[in-house]
């Protein structure tokens, strides 16, 4: 099974089981041919199932497997993915959820799709990842999106984007985890089941009905606000008070409880699969943006979700399962969530390694020598029509804010961006820093123009 944890790989090629039978005695041909089971096995190994799990507002400081942050949730299933897979340390997303989801779905940066901030709708003229796989892979993948959509409030939007089955939450958040509007293929009903549990139930039911390779985009709304306490059996944070005053006074344990509940339900989903199906599934686990300010740990105040600082865009990404050969390893290559489009299409057999702004990272699943990006880019729009944009390379990061101010950080020795090298008291830049800034500006102009 390949697991990619934003909780997100490709399958290894397998040789044809039908060898040259020209020298096989006629009476032995039947014994030499693969059985139906063997043929089925060959087909599934070359066409792995793909499970993309998106956690909502889960930053690095709250993620197992990352050194940042002193308080971590108990997430044994995610930790198992880490132990049997590959953890990316330099994965970038957008600072908020809508642009991240749009960039995964289209493989494009937000300025190309006009999805730059929360609630920006994605045009149905864009080609989705699911549509691309349908049109270019011969493996016959079925697909579903279950959970948070947040790309349009139109109930027909998922279908128009080529989603075979959609059930979940069209908006960005719920007011109550146990009383919310469930959208299912165009119809709306009220659900009183804890959202994380309901999405998992729907995922289990959908997978159980598959008889072809499948691609499931499972987008939990946890641990996004409101920090409502999950059912007690799903977490280990204890009997916390559930009134709003208590939650607001100390939100961190509630945030932890939501992630633990998500992990418990992911474990239930994985346990629902047969060993063969699980072995043949690539799992990609990813966060959609950084940590909310009220539950940040080491990040500076207001340099978190909603900003292009590291606390807003550096996200957990883990891959495990089918096609992932690197076990319990860490990868420092630069990766962007747009790369999930080309990666998942590549795994599905769609025949691409690069499209739009997306580059397949499948090669990294088996090799440390497959770095695909020298630069990573991201952005966020604002209500006034302006935009903060940022770009980094292996050592430095440049930010251009909508008000025209600039920042330059040497991330290799200043990962929390404490020292802006462009501050007046830091100028002039050293020759080495000037070279890095110029390279970043040159690439930024190339991307934007």
Image: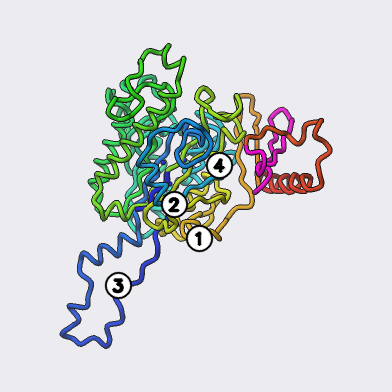
Residue 449 appears in view: no
Is 245 drawn above or below residue 375 in the view shown?
Answer: above
Look at the numbered disc 4 and give the secondary structure of its residue.
strand
Q: Residues within 10 Å of mark 1 (few under 14, many from 20)?
A: few
Q: CA distance from mark 3 to mark 2?
A: 31 Å
Is 33 drawn above or below residue 44 in the view shown?
Answer: below
Q: On residue 328, which mark appears? A: 2
Q: Disc 3 or disc 2, which is closer to the eye?
A: 2
Q: On residue 92, which mark appears? A: 4
Q: Residues within 10 Å of mark 2 (few under 14, many from 20)?
A: some
Look at the numbered disc 2 and give the secondary structure of its residue.
loop
Quadrant of residue 138 within the rendered picture = bottom left
Pick whichever, 309 or 165, lies toward us. Answer: 309
Instruction: From the viewer's perspective, tell me whether residue 435 is left or right of residue 148.
Output: right
Residue stretch rendered in magenta on the structure: 394-415
Disc on the earlier residue, 3 or 2? 3
Q: On residue 17, which mark appears? A: 3
Q: Are marks 3 and 2 in contact (CB under 8 Å)?
A: no
């Amino acid at each position: 099974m390949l697991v990619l944890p934003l909780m997100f790989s490709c399958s290894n090629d397998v040789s044809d089981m039908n060898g040259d039978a020209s020298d096989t005695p006629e009476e032995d041909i039947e014994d030499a041919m693969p059985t139906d089971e063997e043929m089925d096995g060959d087909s599934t190994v070359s066409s792995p199932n793909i499970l993309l799990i998106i956690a909502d507002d889960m930053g690095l400081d709250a993620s197992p497997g990352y050194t940042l942050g002193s308080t971590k949730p108990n997430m044994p299933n995610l930790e198992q993915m880490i132990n049997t897979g590959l953890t990316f340390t330099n994965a970038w997303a957008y600072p908020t959820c809508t642009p991240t989801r749009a960039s995964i779905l289209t493989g494009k940066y937000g300025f190309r799709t006009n999805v730059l901030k929360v609630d920006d709708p994605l045009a149905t003229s864009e080609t989705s990842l699911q549509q691309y796989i349908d049109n270019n892979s011969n493996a016959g993948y079925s697909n579903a999106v279950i959970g948070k959509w947040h790309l349009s409030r139109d109930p027909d939007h998922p279908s128009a984007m080529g989603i075979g089955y959609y059930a979940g939450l069209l908006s960005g958040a719920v007011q109550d985890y146990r009383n919310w509007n469930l959208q299912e293929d165009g119809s709306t009903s009220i659900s009183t089941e804890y959202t994380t549990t309901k999405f998992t139930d729907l995922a289990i039911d959908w997978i159980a009905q598959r008889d072809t390779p499948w691609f499931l985009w499972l987008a939990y709304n946890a641990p996004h606000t409101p920090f409502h306490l999950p059912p007690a059996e799903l977490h280990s944070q204890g009997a916390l008070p559930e009134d709003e005053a208590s939650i607001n006074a100390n939100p961190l344990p509630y945030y932890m409880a939501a992630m633990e509940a998500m992990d418990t339900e992911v474990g239930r989903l994985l346990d629902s699969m047969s060993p063969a199906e699980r072995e043949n599934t690539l799992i990609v686990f990813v966060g959609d943006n950084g940590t909310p300010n009220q539950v940040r740990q080491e990040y500076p105040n207001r340099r978190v979700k909603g900003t292009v600082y590291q606390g807003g865009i550096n996200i957990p990404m883990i891959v495990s399962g089918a096609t992932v050969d690197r076990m319990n390893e860490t990868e420092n290559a630069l990766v962007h969530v747009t790369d999930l489009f080309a990666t998942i299409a590549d795994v599905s057999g769609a025949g691409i390694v690069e499209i739009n702004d997306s580059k397949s990272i499948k090669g990294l699943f088996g090799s440390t020598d497959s770095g695909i990006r020298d630069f990573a880019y991201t952005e966020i729009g604002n209500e006034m029509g302006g935009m903060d944009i940022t770009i980094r390379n292996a050592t430095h990061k440049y930010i251009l804010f909508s008000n025209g101010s600039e920042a330059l950080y040497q991330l290799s020795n200043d990962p929390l961006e404490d020292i802006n090298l462009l501050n007046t008291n830091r100028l002039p830049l050293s020759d080495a820093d000037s070279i890095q800034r110029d390279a970043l500006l040159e690439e930024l102009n190339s991307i934007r123009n």
